[in-house]
Image: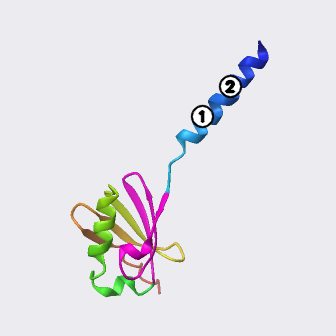
Amino acid sequence: MAAIIGVGLVAAVANALYFGAPRITQVAAESAGQGVEKVDVSGEAAMVTVKPDWPSTGGTNLPPLIGLLRNRGVKRALIMNRTGGMIGTLEVATGRLSLVKPADAKQ
């Protein structure tokens, strides 16, 4: 009897770990426009890794990225540089990009 309960407990834990973990899907960056290195999507959120010169393009690279994210059902995306620093957030429905301003150096 204890063995059956033990097997059931192990199965329940494995099920919770497998189905409880968020699913992250990597999308082909080529379809996200110039300057995008990586796109990871999980549900309605995404993390987009871009090249260092991407923020200086004045938003010309946004339309392909927004189209890709909308097709995947993403509502909000974090835009990151390749070292893990946050560049900004993108509201996919409106296409609004909010850039993070670097903190002023303390003198």
Compared to residue 36, the image places residue 90 above or below, namely above
Residue 9's disc number: 2
- Horizontal side of 15 relative to 32 (left or right) equals right
Q: Quadrant of the N terminus?
A: top right
The residue labelled by disc 1 is 15
Q: Position of residue 41 (x, y in %)?
A: 43, 59
Compared to residue 55, the image places residue 17 above or below, namely above
Residue name at image x 78 percent, y 19 percent: 3
Residue name at image x 47 percent, y 87 percent: 107
Residue name at image x 49 percent, y 74 percent: 85
Q: Position of residue 19 (x, y in %)?
A: 54, 39
In front: 17, or 101? 17
Query: What is the CA distance from the residue labelled 1 to the residue labelled 2?
Result: 10 Å
Residue name at image x 70 percent, y 29 percent: 10
Residue 23's disc number: none
Start-end of magenta stretch: 25-51
Whether residue 100 is visible to the viewer of this picture, yes or no, is no
Whether residue 40 is in magenta: the answer is yes
Compared to residue 67, the image places residue 30 above or below, namely below
Q: Earlier in the sequence, mark 1 or mark 2?
A: 2
